[in-house]
Amino acid sequence: MAKGYKSKVLSAGNLYQYFFNSILTKDEGLDAENLTQLALGTLGQASLYRKWPGIKWLLANLAMDCQRHDVRLEQRLFGCRFKNPIGLAAGLDKNGVAAAIWDAFGFGFAELGTVTWHSQKGNPRPRLFRLAAEQAALNRMGFNNNGAEMMKRTLEQQKLPHPGQRDSVLGLNLGKSKITTLDEAANDYASSLKTLASLADYIVINVSSPNTPGLRDLQHSKQLHPLVERLRESDNCPPLLVKIAPDLGNEALDDLARFSCEEGLAGLIAVNTSLDRLGLEKRVLSQTGLSLEQEAGGLSGVPLRKRGVEVIKRLRQTAGPSLPLIGVGGIDSPESAWERISAGASLVQIYTGWIFQGPDLIPRILEELLSQLDHHGFQNISEVIGSGAPWIQP
């Protein structure tokens, strides 16, 4: 029986807090994007040279800290075996540089990207802002990435096991290039898919980023249908999921849920960042001197938690029990992860919460999920999905 998470003195999480807590507790200081790139550069080298003795030892110790193995957390969804329901959300490892080592942090799966067919620099900087007090972030990155062909080379250099033979599942998140018109969007996505299909356990069609003009128009079923059909023409097309925005109304959510079932999509990912300021309209960014209602970009983190739950509940209600849903947005604790699964998510993803909380967040979530299974008498995490089972305070 899980007894609740207890961190070791020299755990990865404690070391993370020691080095980064002073940065993450205030908006100012080291630029958020620079900090991310510094970390990814280090992780990328570790992934590429992970079999070197010193790096192999460090990763093994990281895995001992962060991984938790229990058959009760395992599921098989859209042909993939997930060893636990906690995944890394898209947006952090845009170019797949650390693809081979995300499982060492305890993730059951990782979603790489968003990647576009054409490489692109993204929007002007500054474009990523910490909201430390709110445990949130504002980003208007604009799909900055090296392009699909470069991602393929990056993944091949890491000599990853083939899909289905990996320690954890890898999804690839595809977006539309900014220079591509909406009329040509299907061909743009298809070019990326053709290049990357053999490397992906699943593919995500990202039509919900607020930072590429016109992209969210593709969320409507009339526009989405030809896009899905075009991608399915690709040889050996992996399972297809669609990532949607939190700012859709109930009718649009119902339409997407029905569309996904009728089209036989592998699942829906809900939600992306929000254009709604969620009560933080007057919050001023010290870096720019402007309020959030004056700033462009999508909001992520804790303020998105409530809306994320609402969207998952609505999708599950409309789609029924068979369509896999991946919940993301505002998950930064065991309770918020359980809440999303209980509302109807088969899997959950974290990003902003993981940055603020550090590596201990994953083992803490996994151990507390097991504790909740014990409290409720569930035999497997799949029994929790859409059950409405409440969080029981330890």
Image: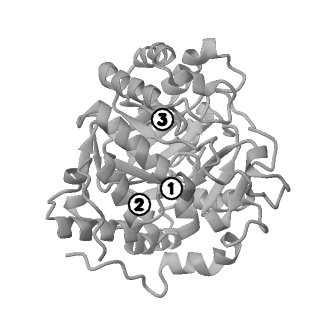
Q: Please, what is the three-letter code of the amino acid marked with disc 3?
A: Lys
The earlier-in-sequence mark between 2 and 1 is 1
Residue under pointer 1: 330
Q: From the image, state whether disc 3 or disc 2 is nearer to you.
A: 2
> Could you classify mark 2 by the number of other residues whose Cα lies within 10 Å: few (under 14), some (14-19), or many (20 or more)?
many
The quarter holding residue 34 reads bottom right
Cα–Cα span, label 3 and label 2: 20 Å
Taking 196 as reference, is 351 above or below it? Answer: below
Tell me if 183 is positioned left or right of 170 in this view: right
Q: Please, what is the three-letter code of the amino acid marked with disc 2?
A: Ser
Colouring style: one colour
Q: Residue 111: x and y, percent? A: 47, 45
Q: Residue 372: x and y, percent? A: 25, 67
Residue under pointer 3: 243
Cα–Cα span, label 2 and label 1: 8 Å
Taking 378 as reference, is 268 above or below it? Answer: above
* SS for callout 3: strand
> Could you classify mark 3 by the number of other residues whose Cα lies within 10 Å: few (under 14), some (14-19), or many (20 or more)?
many
Residue in the image at 18% along x and 65% along y: 376
Image disc number at residue 198: none
Q: From the image, state whether disc 3 or disc 1 is nearer to you.
A: 1
* SS for callout 1: loop
Cα–Cα span, label 3 and label 1: 16 Å
Residue under pointer 2: 336
Are the two marked residues, 2 and 1, in contact with CB atoms closer than 8 angstroms?
yes
Q: Is residue 328 visible?
A: no
Taking 3 as reference, is 136 above or below it? Answer: above
Are the two marked residues, 3 and 2, in contact with CB atoms closer than 8 angstroms?
no
